[in-house]
Amino acid sequence: MAGHTADMMSIKAFTLVSAVERELLMNDQERVNIECVECCGRNLYVGTSDCFIYHFLLEEKVLPSGTVAFTATKQLHRHLGFKKPVSELRAASALDRLLVLCDSCISLVSMHSLEPVPSGARIKGASTFALNENPVGGDPFCVEVCILSIKRRTIQVFLVYEDRVQIVKEVSTPEQPLAVAVDGHFLCLALSTQYIILNYNTGFSQDLFPYCSEEKRPIVKRIGRQEFLLAGPGGLGMFATVAGISQRAPVHWSENVIGAAVCFPYVIALDNEFITVHSMLDQQQKQTLPFKEGHILQDFEGRVIVATSKGVYILVPLPLEKQIQDLLASHRVEEALVLAKGARRNIPREKFQVMYRRILQQAGFIQFAQLQFLEAKELFRSGHLDVRELISLHPFLLPTSSSFTRCHPPLHEYADLNQLTQGDQEKMAKCKRFLMSYLNEVRSTEVANGYKEDIDTALLKLYAEADHDSLLDLLVTENFCLLTDSAAWLEKHRKYFALGLLYHYNKQDAAAVQLWVNIVNGDIQDSTRSDLYEYVVDFLTYCSDQQLVWTYADWVLQKSEEVGVQVFTKRSVDEQQQNSFNPDNVITCLKKYPRALVKYLEHLVVDRSMQKEEYHTQLAMLYLEELLQQRVATSSSDAATTEMQTKLRHLLQKSDLYRVHFLIERIQGAGLPVERAILHGKLGEHEQALRILVHELGDTAAAEDYCLWSSEGQDAPCRQRLFHTLLTMYLQAGPLAPELTVAAVDLLNRHTSEFDATQVLQLLPGSWSVQLLRPFLTGAVRGSIHTRRTAQVALGLARSENLLHAYDKMRLKGSAIQLSDRNLCQLCQHPFSEPVFIRYPNGGLVHTHCAASRHSSPTPGTRT
Amino acid sequence: MRRPDAKVVLLGGASVGKTSLLRRYTERRFPDSVSTVGGAFYLKPWRALHLSIWDTAGREQFHGLGSMYCRGAAAVILTYDVTHLQSLVELEDRFLGLTDSANKDCLFVIVGNKVDLTEEAGEGDAHGLGQAGGARACPRVPKQVLREDAVALYKKILRYKMLDEKDAPAAEHMCFETSAKTGHNVDLLFEAVFDMVVPMVLQQKAEEPVETVDLTGHKPPKQARPRCCS
């Protein structure tokens, strides 16, 4: 299980390349071993067990196969003059010095000549040492060195200059220190039973965790700013910051790790048999390289060197991009993204962004190919994918005019959707559905900028192909569908209605309407809209192209006069008044379509209340003709006739504009007494009208009704006259027509207030009983009394008003006025020469002649 | 990589279900998990903060690491197994000492896991158990640790930390019984902890000095360090 997991996670991050062959070093001296290594730029130094230092120049070559090879050229070697092995080497390139630890003494030698410094400066009594890579002093001409003293439990900090050394600090530790790494003021120490962080400036120490130095060699390795890597219990690589906390999960090494190095984002560890590579990002083991008898593993400014006692090797990292590409190639999206994100710090911002976006896009296509659409979408979005990459996977979706070519190198391995789905129709449909929703989402965002045409055209094609409802929505809202491409596609998929919309959107209304007309006529098939005819009518109604409306006016009217006429009646009023849609033109056009004409005239007369005699007359005539026709067709008066008759009556009653005589002529003998009566009424021939109603029609209710409506808006005497006329007519008939007598009684009793009771009483035959006329009489008497009382009240009010005025007058006249020479006329400012004057209610005195002229000139004072 | 704003640490003996609890919460599943080596952590965005949840190894071998993991922790979730009395005892004996390195105001939460295995769970949770594969293979066992025991431990911890019971959150809010297998109380546990941690972090942030350098605010320079090896 564990092995399998390791396999899954594996990646090729490094290759192991030989740097220095043993022959170059040892001259076949079997007993000589490599003790330590230092690498600084191209300089490689090797310290041996027989107290020699070797200096090589490394040359890196990239072979045509892409692999890297190193050749080391020996520059110098020098014996240090002891019998002890060279145990540590450190270069201080700024000082051109190599710090050499040999026989517990750190001496300085020139990096180039390997000669000791003339001053002989040295640090004695060191068991091991570490350079501070994050020095606290600002002096560039010295390095900070921390040594573990061979004296018990002591640490010393030195500043090392070109040719002298200076001790800065000495700190004692609770236990014997065995290994050290430095960052700023912080020392990370392996003591004999635990790791600690020690601030050598303040002396404050912080325990990290215990371990057992008897069981294994401690490892303390600075891996970056304020962070160390330590060998923990159970083969753990533990991370710890100078604050004593762990910010990364540990990596799991083997129990017997002897060295560790860091080459971002990897932690490399060495044991007797293997070099293992773990990612610091996900803590997983990524690579294992067999390597026997290694005993040194160190990184030098990003270059990782391993050595056995006989040879030196370099671990060459594969470029991150290559690693990421390998991961993507094996569809390990998560890991690739983690690695790419982790590389952010190590790559310049612009370069990183370009690279990272590309990786996101590639990852998106991998997810897409696995139909993981949600993930794919997120990756495409965050990777700012040119959506045309995605569109181009679907054959024929991009418009022929599109300038798009796929990105090179390609983002994925698929030629098209067919290949991707291996012809699986269901998968293909899913991909298309995803593309639809994705395009629909991005089309209005800035992602679409620059190629909206490509996106919208592709979307239209997808919708049309899938018979998707949104096709119409797309076409009726703002879109950038390319006409020729889209039109051909819609035609291919028989989306003629949509094609019409496309034409309309592209201002080709004529083509659009022609297409729709063809569908309605059944010349081509498209069932998108069952109410297409109404749609066309509606379209023409709101169409500003007058010529187009006239072209199809006959067609819409032929299809349905009632509906078709809407192209004229529902048009905006402004448009109807001007230009070719004025009523006369329209009426001429509608001559052939009587029902449409009726509708249109109704629109003019009723809706728009046009006060033009012709329209009223014509409408009345049309009603009449229609009515007569219906009469002929159906002997009995059914609903339609009644409706027509109601309309006609209504028009005749309400309108005062039609030519009455003309209509009377037409109506004679047509058997339409009510209408005839209305017409007579319009001429003021009320008696005749009533006679028709009473005698011809025998409809007393209609007669009563006539009196009411025809006197509508007229004064009371006029109405009284009408009722009297009717009453007289009833009474004249005498006892021969008893039903009229009854009608007369009813009329009187119902409309009491419309009659002058005194006149009526004179007309009534003496034989009628009072009982019969009781309601009338009661009403009449009540009315009369009411009138009298009202008059009395009015009289009383008038009297009291008169009294008030009289009082005012008295009050004003009440006081005497003295007229002297000092009084001046308020108007002309002259004294009064005569006793006659006029006094205004406010007390002002004026000449009579001034007052007379004042009425024609502006007022000097208010006259209350 | 974003720095977490606060740390929550899961502590407890081997096989009490720390990793399972965390995976149930983060992955919504209950996979077979192997013994945790060293530790692992999970970054959880919560109300504009990033919290790191450390899953530690319960095995004795890694015991020494606990103190470092707890350093600066805002909350420690002490986990035991309700079917195993020793696991509660261990919390006090082995793990409580590790929390000395945690924040002064660190919250202590006590969680009894594996309630699905106990006889009590039988009636109420039968349905949930039936769905979880292999439930029948685990015979029901009597509950060995009662909730009261956990509450008592919580109070003991407060005394150990020399906190007044009145100032610390009430025990009933800090003791949970969960099942990583069925998911019982798992979300409740973590989210309750996060919700308690957030105000603490915000308060800390408000108190600590701003990290931006104020160029206008002039401060007298500190006394220069002695130059020579005096």
Image (spheres, coloured by chain):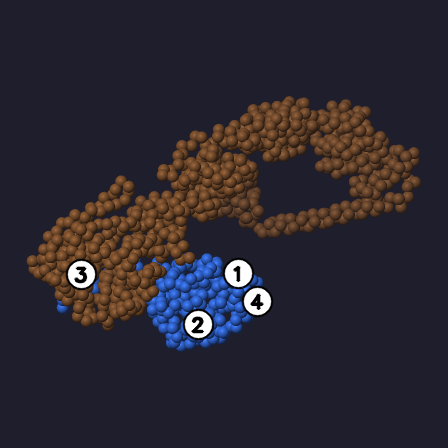
Chain colours: A brown, B blue
Q: Where, quadrant-wise, is the N terminus of chain B in this rendering?
A: bottom left
- As drawn, A6 above or below A704: below
Q: Identify residue for label 1.
A: B133
Name the residue beneath numbered marker 2: B87
Give whichever of A377, A626 is nearer the camera: A377
Q: How many numbered discs sit on the rendered protein?
A: 4
Give the residue type that dot 2 points to.
Answer: Ser
Where on the picture, by quarter, is residue A47? Answer: bottom left
User: What is the secondary structure assignment of the residue under circle 1?
Assistant: loop
Residue A330 position, x and y percent, is 39, 47
Q: Residues within 10 Å of mark 2 (few under 14, many from 20)?
A: many
Task: Residue type at mark 4: give it.
Answer: Gly
Query: Mark 4 falls on what kind of element?
Result: helix
Residue indicated by mark 3: A87
Question: What is the CA distance from the residue labelled 3 to the residue labelled 4?
Answer: 69 Å
Q: Decide: few, some or many residues near mark 4? Use Cα within 10 Å; few <14, some 14-19, many ≥20.
A: few
Q: Amino acid at mark 3?
A: Ser
Q: Could you say which quadrant of the image residue B34 lies in? A: bottom left
Circle 1 or circle 4, nearest the eye: 1
Q: Is residue A45 left or right of residue A703?
A: left
Residue ID for mark 4: B124
